[in-house]
Amino acid sequence: MEFLLTAYDSTDEGALDRRMSVREEHLAYARKLYQNGNLIKGGAFLSDEGKMIGSTIIYQVDSEAEVQEIIANDPYKIKGVWVDITTKPIRLANLD
């Protein structure tokens, strides 16, 4: 099953600094998920000024419980970068 995550960052004054301080740890975690096939694609939401304010990720997992476990272990979640998180099951189109 595929799941779409949308996660918005906190809007407090230190939000962008917190994101940047955790970014490499988050990307290392994402790379591991990508290598094992659980993360298809992801990236950051940008403000009108081009600053990162959230994330979107497409996961490939067996269940909602598995995607929730992946999110719970993400450094962005653990360290308070993401505060408004939603997931939805999706079906990706086969374009091959």
Image (cartoon, helix red, strand yellow):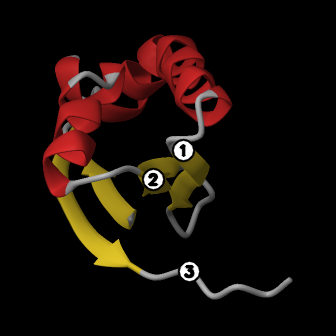
The front one of 82 and 64 is: 64
Element at label 3: loop
Q: Do callouts 2 and 1 mark residues in contact (Cβ within 8 Å)?
A: yes
Disc 2 marks which amino acid? Tyr
Q: Please, which residue is most extreme toward the front here?
A: 62
Residue shown at 33%/19% (left/top)? 75
Disc number for residue 57: none
Residue shown at 19%/33% (left/top)? 69
Residue shown at 59%/61% (left/top)? 49
> Toward which corner of the image does residue 71 lie, by quadrant?
top left
The residue carrying mark 1 is 39
Element at label 2: strand
Q: Residues within 10 Å of mark 1 (few under 14, many from 20)?
A: many
Mark 3 vs 2, N-terminal side: 2
Q: Do callouts 3 and 2 mark residues in contact (Cβ within 8 Å)?
A: no
Q: Is residue 13 visible?
A: no
The residue carrying mark 2 is 59
Disc 3 marks which amino acid? Leu
Disc number for residue 92: 3
Disc 1 marks which amino acid? Leu
Residue shown at 51%/21% (left/top)? 23
